[in-house]
Amino acid sequence: MAKSNVGKKPISEEEYTTNKVLTVFSVCLLGVLVLMIVQRLMDYGNTWATGMLVSKILLGIGVLGAICGIVLLVREASGKRSADRRIVCGRNVLIVSVVMAVAMAAIMYLGTGPIKLLYVALPVLAVYYLVYHSYAREFFLIALDTGVGVALMWLVHRALDSASYVWMSYAALGAAVVLTVVQLVCVAMLRGKNAKVTNKGKKVSIQFSKNAYTMLAITPVLMTVLVAAVLFAPTHMLIAMGVAAAYLFITAVYYTVKLM
């Protein structure tokens, strides 16, 4: 039988994006499962040493993965390997490996405390990745603003619980104000340039909708007001977070309908 000369059909951009999102969700889910096992081992005295051994092994894998990622990056930069529409490329391998190595190092030196933070960080990362690739750019920024605002509200609440860390609550509010000012300036600049930025000498359109500038101006201001509300009225923290969640939900519904 004659051998077919028809080459393999290249993967489309939509398929590549879908594969990337699924891969990120799978890696984050696997990470959570591994963290659950490590925490389970380190929570008991008779298995603590095993938990530390597992952490050291994963740290070593992370370091080796980072080295492999750097090698792949060098090969891709020299043209010996193409990174076009590849899930396993130097950048991705390096990022995953560095995150694994840093997480395991933190667990080894700080105990199981960082695991609780990673339980939240990994799913949130996966969701934001999905939003970035599935929704309009302005909604990703709106979701990012809301996430940062909720995180600052939580930080203010925790700081107020200890007299030694009250200053952190004011620092959190200051950070919210600074981020708001920076975003308002950027929004004003983009509005003046019709959402076009220069990248490597070429003008690229960010493709904002007509209501994007208003939403991107309102959201950081609202989050700053809510952070201030938690600082000066700590008993209303749940209400402030509820307002932020409701705002994000309504905005998500609006942009989801626009996708239809």
Image: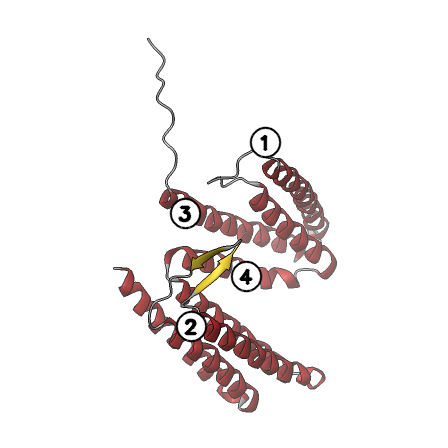
Q: Quadrant of residue 116?
A: bottom right
- The residue under label 2 is 191
Quarter of the image with the N terminus is: top left
Q: Is residue 153 visible?
A: no
Residue 132: image location, x then y, percent: 43, 58
* Left or right: residue 58 compared with residue 182: right
Q: Tag 1's secondary structure?
A: loop
Q: Earlier in the sequence, mark 1 or mark 2?
A: 1
Task: Please tell me which residue lies in front, 156 or 111.
Answer: 156
Q: Earlier in the sequence, mark 2 or mark 3?
A: 3
Q: Tag 3's secondary structure?
A: helix
Q: Earlier in the sequence, mark 2 or mark 4?
A: 4
Q: Is residue 184 visible?
A: yes
Q: Earlier in the sequence, mark 3 or mark 1?
A: 3
Label 1 or label 2, whichever lies nearer to me, is 2
Task: Single out the residue that lies furthest toward the top.
Answer: 1
Tell me which amino acid carries mark 2: Arg
Which residue sits at x=59%, y=53%? Answer: 35
Contact? badges 4 and 3 (CB < 8 Å): no
Contact? badges 1 and 2 (CB < 8 Å): no
Q: Quadrant of residue 218?
A: bottom left
Task: Single out the residue that lies furthest toward the left.
Answer: 260
Which residue sits at x=39%, y=34%? Answer: 10
Q: What is the distance, in whole Å, between disc 2 and disc 3 at their CAs?
A: 29 Å
Numbered label attached to residue 121: 4
Numbered label attached to residue 17: 3
Task: Please tell me which residue lies in front, 46 or 178.
Answer: 178
- The residue under label 1 is 80
Q: Is residue 87 above or below residue 154?
A: above
Label 3 or label 1, whichever lies nearer to me, is 1
